[in-house]
Image (tube, helix red, strand yellow):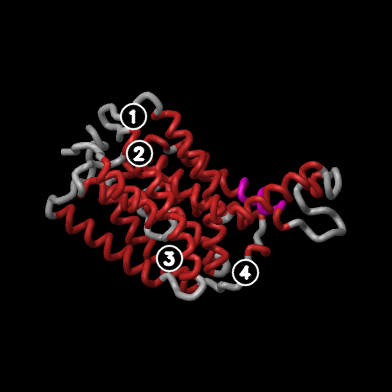
Amino acid sequence: MATGIGTGEAILLGLVQGLTEFLPVSSSAHLRIVGELVGSGDPGAAFTAITQLGTETAVLLYFRRDIKRIVLAWWAALRGAYGTDWRSRAGMPAGRPSDHDALMAWFIALGTVPIVVLGLAFQDAIERPFRNLWLVALTLAVFALVLGWADRRGAKTRTLQELTPRHALAFGFWQALALVPGVSRSGGTITGGLLMGYTREAAARYSFLLAIPAVFGSGLYQLAKSVGSFGESGTPGFGATVVATLVAFVVGYVVIIAFLKIVSTFSYTPFVYYRLGLAALVVVLLLTGVLEPVTAPANA
């Protein structure tokens, strides 16, 4: 039976969130599993979304120069720096090279649409049925194989300079698969990028940038919903949530640095094996009764 999330559990869950958010291993699955193993119960979709604000703030800090350049270029094009027709305002002026940074802002906006639409459409399923550990184990295993296949078969020749509207939208649908715990936001986006021929580093970097509006939107929405209900039955306390979010921020920043260096040199094979091993472990723990497929959220 869940006993709630105290400071110790909050630090542990924040550590787990920070370590796994940017790796293709599914942070939501890890929070779901670890929360129950430490006796806190399922932290819940809201707790997961709010703590992701910490890791996504680490993305803002790490990519601050890229983000500043993209926003300024987008705003300049929108104001008519290249012309007043729609193509110029989009960063594609006739007779001149396209402004990649201005286009990137539009691509990120376009790629965010699928996860917003599907997230709202399947909100109830995301918060309860999708968190069934049998489903988590299945998605961990299946998407491990898909990631491994994509890493082997992908051409790995495209850079982000070659991103197109069609690919931007496709990236968005791959990211939206992460609404199911076990898929992984970065894992889904990277897998899609590899299958479309992008390099490992390009797919990884774009997964960070594409996640910014989706994660902040989801986290702030869940934070607004939770105001006034922190600490009630089924809801982690406000203090525990803040602690977990701060820990996730610090750890997440370090992981970004390490992950981008790793994917520039090595394949995703270790993550494939890790996902398969974790899926097998979850199945064993379910079969032996150590874990329950569906539990009440923390504090219930």
Q: Earlier in the sequence, mark 3 or mark 1?
A: 3
Please tell me whether residue 104 belongs to the stretch shown in magenta: yes
Does the residue at mark 1 contact the one at mark 2 (Cβ under 8 Å)? yes
What residue do we see at 37% from left, 52% from top?
A: 27
Q: Check disc 2 and give the amino acid type.
A: Thr
Circle 3 or circle 2, nearest the eye: 2
Which residue position holds label 1? 230
User: What segment carries the magenta color?
Assistant: 102-109
Give me the C-alpha separation between circle 2 and circle 4: 40 Å
Up-down: is 43 above or below 233? below
Q: Which of marks 1 and 2 is nearer the N terminus?
A: 1
Q: Earlier in the sequence, mark 3 or mark 4?
A: 3
What residue do we see at 56% from left, 58% from top?
A: 206
Q: Position of residue 89 (x, y in %)?
A: 79, 46
Determine whether, in the image, residue 143 is placed left or right of residue 3.
right
Which residue position holds label 2? 241
Please give the label number shown on residue 158: 4
**From where the camera sits, is residue 187 visible?**
no
Which residue position holds label 3? 147
Q: Position of residue 72 (x, y in %)?
A: 72, 48
Which element type, helix, strand or loop, lies under badge 1? loop
Q: Where, by quadrant of the figure, is residue 280 drawn?
A: bottom left
Give me the C-alpha separation between circle 1 and circle 2: 9 Å
Main SS type for the magenta part?
helix
Please give the label number shown on residue 291: none
Does the residue at mark 2 contact the one at mark 4 (Cβ under 8 Å)? no
Give me the C-alpha separation between circle 3 and circle 2: 31 Å
Q: Check disc 1 and give the amino acid type.
A: Phe
Give me the C-alpha separation between circle 1 and circle 4: 46 Å
